[in-house]
Amino acid sequence: MFDFFRRHTKIVMVVLFLLIIPSFVLFGVERYTHFNDNAGVAEVDGQSISQAEWDQAHRQDIERTRAANPRIDLRLLDSPEAKYESLERLVHERVLQAAANDQRLAVSDQRLAAELAQDPTIAALRRADGTMDMDTYSRLVATQGLTPEGFEARLRADLAARQVLGGVFNTELVSAAQVDAAMDAYLERREVRVKRFAPADYASRLNPGDADLEAFYKANLARYLAPESARIEYVALDLDSVKKGVTVSEQDLRAYYDQNAASLGAPEERRVSHILINAPKGAPAAEREKAKAAAEQLLAQLRKAPGSFADVARKSSQDGASAPSGGDLGFFRRDKGIDPVIAKAAYALGKAGDLSDVVESDFGYHVIQLTGIKPAAVPAFEQLRPKLEEQFRTQQAQKQFGELAETFTNGVYEQSDSLKPIAEQLKLTVQTADNVGRTPVPGATGPLADARFLGALFSADSLEKKRNTEAVELGATQRVSGRVVQYNPAHARPLAEVQSQVRAAFVHERGAALAREDGQAKLAAWTADPNAAAASLPAAVTVSRDAPQGQPPQLIEAALRADPAKLPVFVGVDLGSEGYAVARVDKVLPKAGQTAEVIDQNRQDYEQQWASAVASQYYELLKSRYKAAITVSKPSAETTMDLLPAAPAPASHRGLDDRPQRHQEESLDNGGKALP
């Protein structure tokens, strides 16, 4: 069949041309090129959000998360729920952008510049002259997959969207009566007597047999999993490995010594004394001319008697700091330690005792005398040889690293079934490691401490096909690639190995059940006959929501919700694995006295919470107004409940910011700000 195609290539091309071209005419090229990418996953204001846009947003979430927390557990980024959060976040942004457009909320260039200036990372990129280091800026925003123009456009859109919810925050008013009522309820105190029924109190009644333990073990198999692990090999290209391959000749070292002699030793230092006649730069011209004339007169006097410089300085110099010491400014280098104007004049003089002409600075006019010279001290070549060789190797390795990194990247990809070829080509060592997991273990170093490298090792392509990972960039001068030699999926540890753990868990759970039964029985009995509880209940304690006195939150809530008209009253609370608690609520106490500062802070907190709740409801209204809808199903809780992966997670399920479940609330609390 294939021979027919090879022999009749032209005929086949004509047939394909006749079949394909009409379909392009009828449906358009764009329908073909974007059929998959533009499949809608959500819609806002009649505009579809495509799968490609979702994937891009998800990738940006991943990069932001990794940049903020390089050691994050990659399993958090590797779930359907994580990716769905990215889609919800994208819909949130689009809803606010639609509202901003309708309300014609624009962001000026000045507002954008002010926002950028508030970012310390970006502000640090400004040079001394106020210009931006655009190369570093471009690399910075490129980590988010954006150009500077794209980053600024997104920030401008974010600022406009922030104004949508910002208006709600800034206009919502809460009365003092509302605050007082809410805080009175929150800070109310009650006197209670609490009896705890703890699982440990019932352990002596339990003596499980082998059959009991085996049944419990099988019913709770997920608790006793040995985590997945892999035996790997990896190759790292770094500056140290490149330096080993750098050849250094004697001629190279001597040339390097000659070229850098000035920076290898101590540079020349000079010492001067000066006389200053004050005339600030902004002073009137007449005042400056008068000061200059006075300096020139002193210079003429000193040229006749240079040895009197110190005495003249003490009498005439207007520099209060140096005049008492005869104008002495001490030793300094040409490029540091003194005003550049004085340094330039000092290094123009030939020998100690020489006088400068009158020198003008921002402070006035100076007469300068050179009083000492410390010549540059350059150690001999042999003395510096070890240091020179190390510096030269490092310099040459840095020059070679870029080219070798490209060779490394291409090599591990092109020969993806083995690391040996690239190791031999670049004279690197193939290293091995066993029991490697998806996340770095405490004390791990090098590539094994990097979550990105481990994430690449546990990708579907690496686990299923045993291929080399891509060359992972761990730093400016480090690349690493690895491959999985043997993969051990997570598996249940045998009962014999975990029997003591199984027994402890069995006793604890059964103890909790007995505690719950006993507690419920006591609650019923004491409710029927309150006097029967007197001997069993401990001393009373005063509890509130902000001062629980070590009591469980469930118990505090139950005690504070008890009907005050029926006190004293018994309440019981199931504490789950911690057993059961019964409390007799005796009486209501007023809230504790508060300072004016605390009351004011309470009011601010309440107003913030109220505004957040209103903003949240306003956002829901906007979602309805702009018909925001997600058309893909939300993953169920069972999707990621089991950490025993039968197969590697698909690549499309990776991602998300390290703030799951909180993004919308944080965005609302910040006036709708979407952090770049």
Image (spheres, rainbow, N blue to C red):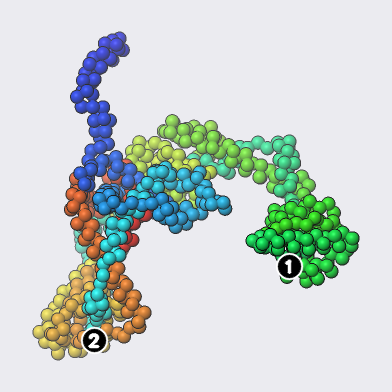
Q: How many marks?
A: 2
Q: Secondary structure at mark 1?
A: loop
Q: Secondary structure at mark 2?
A: strand
Residue at image mark 2: 589
The amino acid type, in three-letter code, at marker 1 is Asp
Examine the rendered structure and indicate whether residue 326 appears above or below residue 622. below
| Residue 305: % across, % down | 89, 62
Q: Quadrant of the N terminus?
A: top left
Name the residue at 40% across, 46% down: 151
Q: CB under 8 Å between callouts 2 and 1? A: no
Q: Nearer the viewer, residue 3 or 394?
A: 394
Q: Nearer the viewer, residue 21 or 456?
A: 21
Around disc 2, counting alpha carbons within 10 Å, would you say few (fewer than 14), some (14 to 19), or many (20 or more)? some
Q: Nearer the viewer, residue 501 or 486?
A: 486
Examine the rendered structure and indicate whether residue 412 appears above or below residue 433. above
Q: Nearer the viewer, residue 393 or 52?
A: 52
Compared across the picture, whether 266 is left or right of 102 comes to right
The answer to whether residue 414 is seen in the rendering is yes
The amino acid type, in three-letter code, at marker 2 is Leu
Q: Quadrant of residue 330?
A: bottom right
Tell me the tag on residue 319.
1
The answer to whether residue 503 is seen in the rendering is no
Q: Quadrant of residue 315?
A: bottom right
Around disc 1, counting alpha carbons within 10 Å, would you say few (fewer than 14), some (14 to 19), or many (20 or more)? some
Name the residue at 26% across, 13% down: 14
